[in-house]
Image (tube, rainbow, N blue to C red):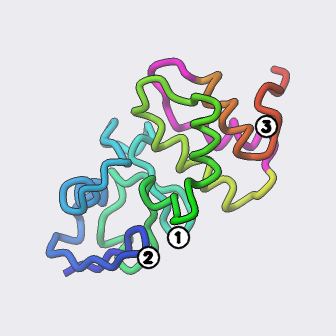
């Protein structure tokens, strides 16, 4: 038996230690925020927070996170409303197909957990390995800037 603490709820699951966390989240707990993208931990679609830090659920085993605090996209919102990062992505229309949205939002939430006032360079570095295949990068960066307290329209000169 593995104990997982997901979105504040304790779950005892009869799964092997080495089963990927993503499979349990989606198939056993019906949490569909994290997506299966590459299966290699490279695209970020499956990202979750583990003890406040971003982790790729497709390449993290359940045994590795047993007893730790896991938060999915569904767990970011509270009774009081959406997480400010979620609100920023809605305000700036930071999605096209939405497949990468889970990874983008989780990545920015993790960045803010670590650094409450990131600059443009920190935002870009954090999102560097979270892939969007539809080309919504402009809107995603605007949403990330807004979530981080920066002017969404002011980009760092390249």
| Residue hosting label 3 | 120
- Percent x, y of residue 110: 60, 56
On the image, the x and y values in percent for residue 65 come to 38, 71
Any magenta on residue 79? no
| Label 2 close to label 1 by CB (< 8 Å) | yes
Identified at 54% across, 37% down, the residue is: 129
Instruction: Judge from the rendering whether residue 17 lies leftward or rightward of residue 126; answer left or right.
Output: left
**How many C-alpha atoms fall within 10 Å of the one at disc 1: few (<14), some, or many (≥20)?**
few
Label 2 sits on residue: 68
Question: Which corner quadrant of the image does residue 71 belong to?
Answer: bottom left
Task: Say left or right for 97 vs 2.
Answer: right
Q: How far apart are marks 3 and 1 (CA)?
A: 25 Å
Q: How far apart are marks 2 and 1 (CA)?
A: 6 Å
Secondary element type, mark 1:
loop
Quadrant assignment, res 42: top left
Q: Is residue 105 left or right of residue 58?
A: right
Residue 153 drawn above or below residue 151: above
Residue 89 is situated, as x and y percent measured from the top left of the image, at: 59, 37
Q: What element carries label 3?
A: helix
Residue at x-position 51% and y-position 28%: 95
- Please tell me which residue lies in front, 29 or 53: 29
Q: What stretch is highlighted in magenta?
A: 118-136
Instruction: State the mark number for residue 51.
Output: 1
Which of the two discs, 3 and 2, labels the residue nearer the N terminus? 2
Q: Relative to the observer, which residue lies in front, 38 or 137? A: 137
């Amino acid at each position: 038996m593995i104990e997982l603490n997901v979105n504040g709820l304790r779950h005892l699951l009869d799964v092997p230690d080495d089963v990927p966390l993503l499979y349990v989240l989606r198939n056993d707990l019906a949490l569909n925020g994290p997506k299966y993208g590459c299966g290699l931990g490279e695209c970020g679609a499956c990202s979750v927070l583990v003890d406040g830090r971003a982790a790729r659920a497709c390449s993290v085993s359940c045994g590795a996170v047993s007893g730790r605090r896991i938060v999915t996209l569904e767990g970011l919102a509270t009774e009081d409303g959406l997480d400010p990062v979620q609100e920023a992505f809605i305000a700036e229309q930071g999605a096209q197909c939405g497949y990468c949205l889970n990874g983008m939002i989780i990545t920015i939430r993790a960045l803010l957990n670590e650094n409450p006032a990131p600059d443009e360079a920190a935002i870009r570095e954090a999102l560097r390995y979270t892939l969007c295949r539809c080309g919504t990068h402009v809107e995603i960066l605007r949403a990330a800037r807004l979530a981080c307290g920066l002017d969404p329209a002011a980009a760092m000169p390249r």
